Amino acid sequence: MISFDSTICTDFAAATSREWLETNGIGGFASGTISGANNRRYHGLLTAATRPPLGRISMLSKYEETVYVDGKRYDISANSFPGTVHPEGYKLITSFRLDPFPIWTFDLDGVVIEKRVFMIYGRNAVAASWSVASSKKAQKIDLELRPLLSFVDYHHLQHGNSEFAVEFKESNGSVEMQPYAAMPPIFFVHNAAAVQNSGYWYRDFEYGIEKERGFDYQEDLFQPFVMKFDLADAATVIASADEKVTDDFAELTAAAIERRDQLVSLVPDASGMVRDLVLAADQFIVKRGNGQTVIAGYPWFSDWGRDTMIALNGLTLAAGRPEIARNVINEFAKHISQGMLPNRFPDEGEEAEYNTVDATLWYFEAIRAYIAATGDNKIVKGALYKKLANIIDWHLQGTRYNIHVDTDGLLYAGEPGVQLTWMDAKIGDLVITPRTGKPVEIQALWYNALRIMSDLSLVYGTNADTDKFDDLADMCRQSFNAAFWNDDEDCLYDVIEDGTRDGSIRPNQIFAVSLPHSMLDDIKARKVVDRVAADLLTPVGLRSLSPADPRYCPVYIGSPFERDSAYHQGTVWAWLIGGYVDAYRRVYPDDIATVDAIIKGFEPHLSQAGLGQVSEIFYADPPHAPCGCFAQAWSVAELLRVAVAASR
């Protein structure tokens, strides 16, 4: 269990830097900080997915919470305003824990109050409760809650305006309100003794992370009414967007705990970091139509094809949930177009974007991993095998963005103004790492896909299919070894285009060793691993560029331009540790201690930023401060995958 005592909780900077996350399995989420002060535009108690898994609307930002003990007032919430924190309820927090959802305890001069927050799975609803855990003597204890509403697209900030409808409807045990006709209403189901009209704009909340990132960072929130409770019994509130949730609160709490216990039970002997990662993995798996997909990261990413396919093994197979892997594979099969998987599904609109070369190739590896884990070859029987074979044909004849197999059997990708690999930072029309031509990991993935198709063709194809895929793979391997080995650096070139070889020391070459079907012999494979270890390995992942490179950026900070410029120019990526561990185990199979040390090195991070989660990226230089998304699917997935594999 991740927990903190008053040492952290009463330190505003330390408590505000630690973020919790609750999700609902359909794209909605709740998030905030230990201190109770929101520090991002994305923090809030109810961000609803109105078109699961997208169409996200920030509805309920938070509650202002005041407890009265025999008439004495204690404000237990906290907010950042210009030049001040008010109120300072964080000073009253004695502990915070994930058990399994966020739980705070407050000490009000001997009266201990416990607060709990969790999302209701499958619904755009967040449940919260406040109760007296202990009291020195019989006292009159009351609670006032003031909901603060935002009602904006979750990427945006609210500002006081006359279009915001302030009226609400109250009935026995519930309140309904709809600030904008174009957005769904919000329902509050509660056990308050009274609801009192208020109607104020609270202005100029400040969000420090947005300020640091160079975005708008001030917001106004509307406070429509006050709910008043007698804490002789626990106070409970369920805020929801889909419908009025009238389920028994105790049963909802028990169901939330039981569901998480069941998830952990699917992984034998899951404890410590593995247990935390199993629960974290579940937060990324969401519904899309009748199938399922993967949210790439919280708080701002949607579902991305590349991230989904890279993360699928760890999020589902390592977590003992192969049926979800199958659902995701089948769901994405519906979106194949011109031999390509979508790169992402935008927040607005239904048209998928296909600007990726690697998502499609990772799809083959996801399918291979699923079959290896389950023995279920039948997943590719019939239509899916034909679609996979058609993908190969599209790459042979050429598809979008000049993606095509060249005469040497290697896969070419790219044209001016587009970024097709995972190193996809772009500022306006400026592509920071275009990598146009033949990127090293794309060749590794292409070869891997061809060998996978050769294996599948033995079951569901023809002899002609097998010969075709084997011939293509053999040509790819021969050309790759002739063109990509960098004798000067004893490793692989990063990109080759028209005879020009990019000798940048980047982590992409690790996949030429780590993937199940590798084109390198043992000697070259070991040299690649050693070079990556020497230049790129950190305790929290691999650097995206060697520190010896003049373009190296040691920190990821500043304006959007500065951050995007550093995104793949040194910044550490946690997800790459999966490929590194696989590669290391291949070339040093007996060195179990090093692998264990690498995996355990992540343990402190799970209590540093996104609690129980793994961040997207880290500063390139020590102490490798976490940044980017505080919860990233492929970061969690790859660490969980190699951690489970190492324990077997």
Image (spheres, rainbow, N blue to C red):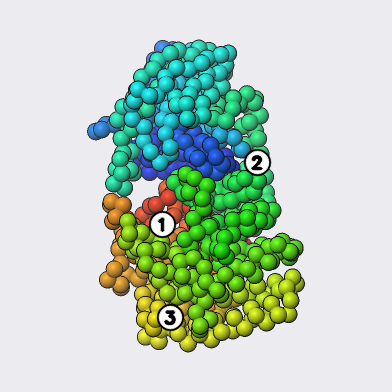
- The residue that disc 1 covers is 617
- The residue that disc 3 covers is 491
Q: Position of residue 288 (x, y in %)?
A: 60, 46
Determine if residue 316 is in view: no
Mark 3 burial class by Cα count in 10 Å: few <14, some 14-19, many 20+? many
| Residue 501: quadrant of the picture | bottom left
Q: Position of residue 307 (x, y in %)?
A: 51, 57
Viewer-closest of 164 and 423: 164
- The residue that disc 2 covers is 259
Tell me if residue 374 comes above or below residue 188 in the rendering: below
Tell me the distance, in whole angstroms, between the alpha carbons under discs 1 and 3. Answer: 24 Å
Name which residue lies at 40% across and 68% down. Answer: 415
**As shown in the figure, which amino acid type bears the numbered disc 3?**
Cys
Tell me the distance, in whole angstroms, between the alpha carbons under discs 2 and 1. Answer: 30 Å
> Under tag 1, what secondary structure?
strand
> Which mark is first along the chain, 1 or 2?
2
Name which residue lies at 56% across and 75% down. Answer: 396
Name which residue lies at 33% across and 33% down. Answer: 219
> Under tag 2, what secondary structure?
helix
Tell me if residue 188 comes above or below residue 378 in the rendering: above
**As shown in the figure, which amino acid type bears the numbered disc 2?**
Arg
Determine if residue 398 is in view: yes
Report the residue that reaches farthest toward the left.
Answer: 83
User: Which quarter of the figure is the N terminus placed in?
Assistant: top right
User: Which quarter of the figure is the C terminus placed in?
Assistant: bottom right
**As shown in the figure, which amino acid type bears the numbered disc 1?**
Ile
> Which mark is first along the chain, 3 or 1?
3
